[in-house]
Structures are given as structure tokens and as C-alpha cells.
Amino acid sequence: MISAIILAAGMSSRMGSPKQLLKLEDRTLIRIVTENVLASSVDEVLVVTGYLEQRVSAAIKDLPVKTFINTCYEQGQGTSLAVGIKALNVKTSAFLVFMVDQPFITASLINTVIGEFEKRSSLVLRPVYNGQPGHPVIFSYDLSDRLKQLAGDEGARQVLKELGDKVDCFPVQDEAAIFDIDTPEIYNSLKMKLEKRI
């Protein structure tokens, strides 16, 4: 069983407004990311909320996902990932982690990552675009105990660093693996491009 954890609890302090609720073509980022994940071959989707929990949950309330609240979201992303891992189905053998600021990660890319992970029997697998490590990262459930201990804002980065060459990497041709909406400038530029296309 393959699960997906979408981290949607943060305050997006660098952005200045919650990324989860930013819109592209009339859909919030949390909805876009969730719909993309649901379109893939994952077996369950968990969404971890926190900041503005009611508004974020309302944006995806009609979708077949399970939502969990991180009451410690102000302490950082690591606490949200820990909440998601603790809520995984007992039959889960591996799980992918998604951020709400990467709306262009498609079901196709997700399925490619899952397929490569299963083919290699990896402990953890990460897509790489043009030499740059990207997302989504998929973890074997064997790492769940270590990841449950996460705190602060480093998220899984610290664990990936600790694992070193045990992290399997494979090249992908999809730039979405490394693209994120990290600043107001990137968001406004992207929004303008999409509006012009329409």
C-alpha cells in the first residue's frame, strides 16, 4: 500500500499569505496539489492542516482524503510530517511527501517515482531534475519511526542528509520536480502567465 502525505499546515511567512489558499485559475494550491495526488496510483491521501485549518479543510472538503490537524504547526514542518506519519494506514509500505507550493507535480510524475521505487526496492527515492534534487520523495515505511521524531522546520531534510548515499536518486525530465512557488514574485509572475494563456 502506497500512501501520500500533503503538508498544508504552515503560515508561509516568506510568502506573506498562506500558500495553501493562493489561487491559480480559480483553484487553491491545496486543491490543485490534492487533486493531482488523487489522480495518481497512491492508495490513500492524508492532508495535514494547521494554520487557518477550517479554511484549508473547506477547500478540499469534497475530496476523498483524510485530514489531520497539527496543533504545533508554528514549530515547523517537521511536526506536520510527524503527524502525517503517525496517521498512516497500518498496511502502508511506503509514503510520498508533498508540499502545497508545488502545483505542477502531475499524476504521471508521481507514478514514475512510485514505479522506480518499487523496481529498485529503495529505502528512500528522490527524483533529480538537471542535477537538482526534487520532489516528491518516497520513503519506505521502515523509516517511519525516525521520521516520527522530527521537530522544528527542517522536515525530512535532516533525515535525508543522515542517510547520505542510501538515498536513491534517479533523473527525471519534468521540471515540476524542482519548481515551487516560494515568493510573491514567483506567484504573481506565474499568475500573469496563466491569465495571458487563458
Image (cartoon, helix red, strand yellow):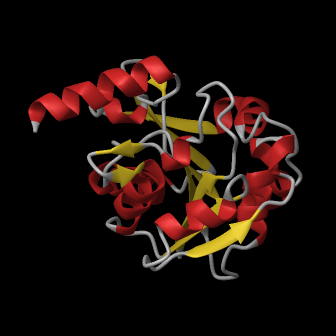
Q: Nearer the viewer, residue 42 or 193?
A: 193
Residue plotted at (48% across, 32% down): 134
**Left or right relative to 12: residue 187:** left
Q: Nearer the viewer, residue 184 or 149?
A: 184
Q: Nearer the viewer, residue 117 or 13?
A: 13
Quadrant in which residue 156 is drawn: top right
Residue plotted at (75% across, 53% down): 80
Is residue 14 at all visible to an observer of this figure?
Answer: yes
Whether 124 is drawn above or below 176: the answer is: below
Whether 51 is drawn above or below 104: the answer is: below
Residue 139 position, x and y percent, is 62, 53
Residue plotted at (79% across, 35% down): 153
**Left or right relative to 24: residue 59:** right
Residue plotted at (33% across, 42% down): 104
Is residue 115 at all visible to an observer of this figure?
Answer: no
**The C terminus is located in which quarter?**
top left
Q: Nearer the viewer, residue 56 or 94?
A: 56
Residue 146 position, x and y percent, is 84, 52
Residue 191 position, x and y percent, is 30, 31
Q: How many marks?
A: 0
Residue 75 position, x and y percent, is 87, 42
